[in-house]
Image (cartoon, rainbow, N blue to C red):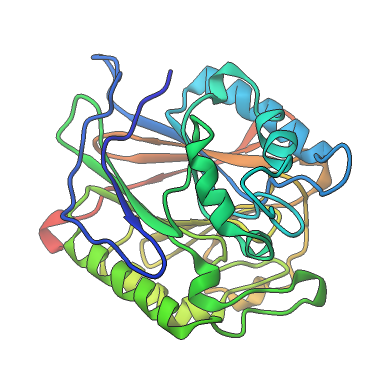
């Protein structure tokens, strides 16, 4: 079942489009529906040589399809690094078929995939991934950064998801050199995105407000906290009472909670990494869950947003849930 999003606010380079927020009902939602459900998976992008997928990606895709059929999903959030190791070179790249279309084939996954770019995507042609939206019914990538607005079925409650390009914001990261983002390639693009984000957050009155990007704000694993996001993004998440920030980049599953903001790392779609070298670089007692063990076979997140809570479940590809948490709606009177 595909529930189509009517309202999408887009921002493109070099011009950011800022329109008044409009929450729309989801087409096709059953009358007895009272929630929005979605999957979030990052770093699922296969490999650039035959068979163009990994065992982890295959196992994770299989479990995603099972969970989508069993628990329900209206869409998938793709959290970047969609094609390893250097993105795609054109809209006609065979990687779209080999690493995406021929992997996530289950009927339950024929729903919109809302996409953002990671550092490996920026090593190739991100514009080609945006253009692929015209060739695929489910690949939704309208701009480098954009806003999604939903009305929770059968309620007067709303959900906003803001999709960011953290590479444009902070710079690229050469993983194989363990290089951290050193700053944006073009400061004007970074500042334009940040200005757009500040405007969208300041105007937003949604009951649940999610922000998603590729780089983590907080992470205990190989890449650790992203200094640029701690400096430029975290203050906005706190000021505007964002419900949660979702990301990938580190190849594991993490849940970190700080000052009523949930930080969800879902980067286990293709590789696994148990590294916890930055455990002491996050706020004390903030880590609620972590796994990057090869025995999980991969992993992803399922979220359900109702009128009064957001239920987040971390799942492993070998078929069981690992951790669940419940997030509260924003205090709209305090906004």
Measuring from the top left, give residue 75's x and y in whole percent.
45, 33
Residue lying farthest to the right in this orientation? 50
Q: Which of 81 and 269 is in front in this view?
A: 81
Q: Quadrant of residue 219?
A: bottom right
Question: In the shown orientation, is residue 205 left or right of residue 230?
Answer: left
* Number of numbered discs overlaid on the protein picture: 0
The residue sitting at 61% across, 78% down in the picture is: 281
Residue 317 in view, yes or no: no
In the image, is residue 177 above or below residue 32?
below
Residue 96 in picture, x, y percent from top left: 67, 39
Quarter of the rendering containing residue 37: top left
The residue lying furthest to the top in this view is: 31
Residue 315 appears in the rendering: yes
In this rendering, is residue 27 above or below 259?
above
**Quadrant, the N terminus:** top left
Q: In this view, does 274 lie above or below 279?
A: above
The front one of 312 and 88 is 88
Q: Where is residue 188 in the image (x, y as percent from the top left)?
A: 41, 82
In the image, what residue occupies the spot 36% across and 41% down?
Answer: 310
């Amino acid at each position: 079942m595909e529930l189509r999003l009517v309202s999408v606010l887009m921002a493109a380079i070099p011009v950011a489009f800022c329109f008044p927020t409009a929450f729309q009902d989801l087409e096709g939602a059953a009358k007895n529906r009272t929630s929005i459900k979605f999957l979030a998976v990052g770093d699922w992008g296969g490999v650039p040589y035959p068979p163009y997928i990994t065992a982890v990606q295959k196992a994770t895709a299989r479990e995603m399809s099972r969970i989508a059929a069993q628990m329900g999903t209206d869409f998938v959030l793709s959290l970047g690094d969609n094609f390893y190791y250097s993105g795609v070179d054109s809209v006609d790249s065979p990687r779209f078929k080999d690493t995406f279309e021929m992997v996530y084939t289950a009927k339950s996954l024929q729903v919109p995939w809302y996409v953002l770019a990671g550092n490996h995507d920026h090593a190739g042609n991100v514009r080609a991934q945006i253009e692929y939206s015209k060739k695929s019914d489910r690949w939704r990538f309208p701009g480098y950064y954009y806003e999604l607005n939903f009305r929770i079925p059968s309620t007067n409650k709303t959900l906003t998801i803001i999709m960011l390009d953290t590479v444009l914001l902070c710079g690229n990261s050469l993983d194989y050199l363990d290089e951290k983002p050193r700053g944006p390639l073009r400061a004007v693009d970074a500042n334009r995105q940040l200005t757009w984000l500040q405007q969208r957050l300041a105007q937003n009155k949604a009951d649940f407000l999610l922000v998603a990007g590729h780089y983590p704000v907080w992470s205990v694993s190989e890449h650790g906290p992203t200094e640029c996001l701690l400096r430029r993004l975290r203050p906005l998440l706190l000021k505007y009472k964002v419900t949660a920030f979702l990301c990938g980049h580190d190849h594991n599953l993490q849940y970190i909670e700080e000052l009523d903001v949930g930080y969800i790392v879902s980067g286990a779609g293709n590789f696994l990494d148990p590294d916890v070298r930055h455990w002491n670089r996050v706020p004390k007692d903030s880590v609620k869950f972590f796994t990057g063990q090869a025995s999980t076979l991969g992993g992803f997140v399922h979220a359900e947003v109702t009128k009064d809570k957001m239920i987040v479940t971390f799942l492993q590809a070998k078929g069981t849930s690992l951790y669940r948490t419940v997030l509260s709606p924003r205090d709209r009177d305090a906004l």
